[in-house]
Image (cartoon, grey):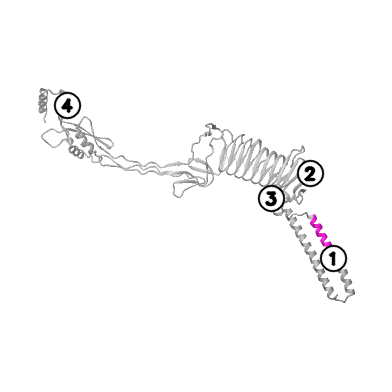
Amino acid sequence: MDNSKNMDNLVQAILDGEDIATIAGSVALKQEEPESTKYSESSEQPPNLDLHIASNRMHASLTISPAYLGQTISPETILEYLNQNGICFGIREGDIREYCRIANYTQPLVCAVGKEVQDETDGQIKYHFDTEKVLKPAERSDGSLDFRELGLVKNIAKGEVLCSLIPASPGTDGMDVMGNAIPAHKGRALSLPVGTNTQISEDGNSLISLVDGTIEMLPGGINVNEVYVVRGDVGPNSGNITAKCSVLIQGDVRSSFFVKAGGDIIVRGIVEHARLEAGRNIVLSQGMNGGGKGFLKAGGNISGKFFENTILEAAQDIYANIIMSSTVRAGGSLILNGTAGSLIAGDCQVGRRVYAKNIGNSSGSVTRVQIESRELNALLAANCKKIVNPEILTQQIESVKQELSDFDRNYQTLSQQFITKHPPDGGPSFKMIQAAAEKKKDQYHKLVQELESKLNESRQSLNSFLDFHVIATGIIFPGTKIVISNSTYNVVKETSNAKFYLNFEGITFGPVLPSDAPDTAR
C-alpha cells in the first residue's frame, strides 16, 4: 500500500467521525521496511515486526506494530519469522499463541528464553569445631557469664573428625536462543588441610585426628598438638585451661583458676590458690602455696620444690623438698629430698612408704603419717597367721634340741648298762628299746624341723612388710603419729636415723640402712 492510498484512507476515516489520533497511528505513513521484516507479497500491508535479541543472546522479544487498526497476526507467522531470524531454542510457543489470541500489541512479546548455565559450585570444607579465635566467656545456666571459661583451647579426641570435604557440585551447560551451547564453568576443588597428627579417612572426605590433643589452625593445614603451650600466665587473659593433651604453662597459675589436662601439666612459675588436674603427672618447677584451697590431682606423680597449705592427690608418688601443713594422698610413696627434706604438720597417707630427712618439728606440730593400701592389707591377710615372735620360736627350738641332747645322753647310758648285764647283742628286749629310742629321737628331729620352718616363714612374712615403712634420716619429732594398717605409734621423744615398720608386736623401729634410700635419693 503506497502513501497516496494511506492518505485516502485517512481522509475517509475523518469523514466517518473516527478518532484522529487513533487513525493516524493505525495508518501512518511507513518507511520502506528492511528485507528482514518483509513478508511475501499479498493483497494487504503486513504488520511491522521488530525483533530485539539481548547482548548475551539469552533473551529475545518481539514488538509488533499493526499496519492498520484491528490488524491481527497468527502464531505461525511469528514462529516463521523467528525461524527466519535464527531463533531456534527456548521458543515460548504457548506464550506466543496466547499473545496472538489477546492481540494486545502495546506490550512486547517475550518470544524466546535461553537455558541458563549452571556453573559448578566451588568445593567447601566443613569444620567440626569452632574456628573463631575470639575469646568469649561461657554462659552459665542462669544466664550469667563465666569470665574464667573463655574457650581458648580447642580439644579433639583421637579418631574424631576435624573437618569434612564437600566436593564441587556438578554444573549443567546452558544454551542461548540462537542454539549455541554455553559451557558451565568448573568449580574450584579443595583439598583437606592435613597437618601434624592428622590423616585423611579412607573415603578421602574427612580429616581425622590421630591423637588426643588441641587444635591449631595454620594457613597451610590443621595440627593436633600433644602439648598445649600457654605462653604466659593462666589468669584473666587466658581463662581456665582444659585440654585433652599435656599442658605447658610458661608463667604462673593465678588464684581461683583451673587447669585440667589429659596428659601432663608442667608449670614453669608458681601456683597460687588454684586447681590442677592431670591425667598423668604434675610437675611444678617452683611450688605452691594453696592457702588451704589449692588442689593438685594427678593420675601419675606430683613433684615440686615446696607445697604449703595444699591438698595433693597422686595415684603414684609425690616428690618435694618440703611439705608444710598440707593434706597428702599418694597411692605409692612420699619422697622428700633436698637439704630440708621435711614433712611438717598436716595429714599424710601413702600406699607404701615415706622417706624424709625430718618429720614434724621442734615445736611439736601434730604430724600424722599413715600407710594404708590394698597391697598392705592383702599381705596382712595372707601372713597374719604366719607371724610369730622369732625370739619365742628360737627359744622353743633350743629347748627341743636340749631335750633331744638329754634324751640321747640318757639313752647312751642306759645302753651301756644293759649291754654289761646281757649278751653282747643285748637280746630281743634290747632291740625293742633301741627301736623305741630311735622313734623318740625322730620325733624330736621332726619337731625341730617344724619349729625352724615356722621361724623361716615368720621371718619371711615380717620381711614382706619391711617395704611399708616411715623413714626419717634426720630427726622425727614428738607430736608425730605413725599409723601402719591397724597399728599406731606415737613419737614421744626425738629419734634420729630411724626406720619405722611392722613386726609381730606392731610398729617398731630400727636404724636406717643405705639400701633403704629410694633411687632418687641415693
**Mark 3 or mark 4: which comes first in sequence?**
4
* Foreground tag (1 vs 4): 1
Residue 422 falls in image quadrant: bottom right
Q: Residue furthest bottom?
A: 423
Dot 1: what SS? helix
Q: CA distance from mark 1 to mark 3?
A: 45 Å
* Foreground tag (4 vs 2): 2
* Foreground tag (3 vs 4): 3
Secondary structure character of the magenta stretch overall:
helix
Q: Nearer the viewer, residue 385 or 16?
A: 385
Q: Nearer the viewer, residue 471 or 174?
A: 471
What is the three-letter code of the residue carrying label 3? Asn
Image x and y of residue 516, in percent: 73, 50
Dot 3: what SS? helix
Q: Of the numbered discs in the image, which one, if any, rests on residue 25?
A: 4
- Look at the numbered discs 2 and 3 and tell me whether their residues touch, using CB distance below 8 Å: no
> Which segment did they paint magenta?
391-404
Determine whether, in the image, residue 215 is placed left or right of residue 97.
Answer: right
**Mark 4 or mark 2: which comes first in sequence?**
4
Dot 2 alpha-carbon crowd within 10 angstroms: few under 14, some 14 to 19, many 20 or more: some
Q: CA distance from mark 1 to mark 4?
A: 161 Å
Q: CA distance from mark 4 to mark 2?
A: 131 Å
User: Which residue was labeled with disc 2?
Assistant: 495
User: Which residue was labeled with disc 1?
Assistant: 407
Say if residue 340 shows up in the picture: no
What is the three-letter code of the residue carrying label 1? Phe
User: Which residue was labeled with disc 3?
Assistant: 377
**Mark 2 or mark 3: which comes first in sequence?**
3
- Look at the numbered discs 1 and 2 and tell me whether their residues touch, using CB distance below 8 Å: no
